[in-house]
Image: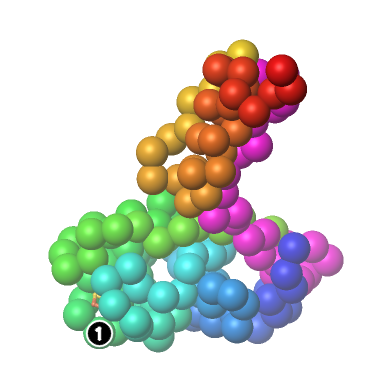
Amino acid sequence: MIPVCRLEDLPAGESVRLDTTPPVAVFNADGALYAVDDTCSHQDASLSEGWLEGCLVECPLHAATFDLRTGQPTCLPARRPVRTHRVSVVDGTIHVHLTEPAAVPVPVPASATSAIVPAGVSGAGSLSATAHSTLTGEGSAA
Ligand code: FES
């Protein structure tokens, strides 16, 4: 949970950028608080410097728009979403709860008799080897 600022310091229609890794943009838009990855999924532009219209933010570089509720682009040239993050207000201070990267491998339990490792998951090679070994008995003491 990362503190952002006091609620009164982020008025409606404004945004703030957090220098986290990756950077996060927090918006007060359309009567709600939203947080998304700050870097546009098209190229290297800061969405916190974009323009708000309702719960959409328009990228300042090539004008792709993103829905702050879902992170999904609503027009080209952006094709990929930006991650969304949960926002809370505790004692008048806005906090962001950073979302785990979507490609975090899920450990396979040692007792698993079957496992499905999604294709393209970062680190899937080592997970596949573990699952294969579990399923076939390879690597176990003879
Ligand atoms: S960098 Fe955002 S639309 Fe191109």
Residue where numbered disc 1 is placed: 61
Where is residue 98 drawn, in percent x and y? 63, 61
Amino acid type shown at disc 1? Leu
Residue at 21% over, 76% down:
63
Q: Secondary structure at mark 1?
A: loop
Q: Residue furthest front?
A: 142
Nearest the eye: 3 or 127: 127
Residue 13 visible here: no
Is 14 contained in the magenta span? Answer: no
Q: Residue 107's x, y, as percent?
A: 65, 37
Asked if residue 37 lies left or right of residue 64, the reply is right
In this rendering, the answer to whether 4 lies above or below 108 is below
Tell me the quadrant of ligand 1.
Answer: bottom left
Q: Specify the segment rendered in magenta.
A: 89-112
Q: Can you tell which quarter of the image residue 4 is in?
A: bottom right
The answer to whether residue 120 is visible is yes
In the depicted structure, whether residue 121 falls above or below residue 128? below
Question: In terms of secondary structure, what is the magenta stretch mainly?
Answer: loop
Q: Residue visible at 46% across and 74% down? A: 38
Q: Tell me the quadrant of the picture where the C terminus can be found.
A: top right
Which residue is situated farthest in the left direction here?
76
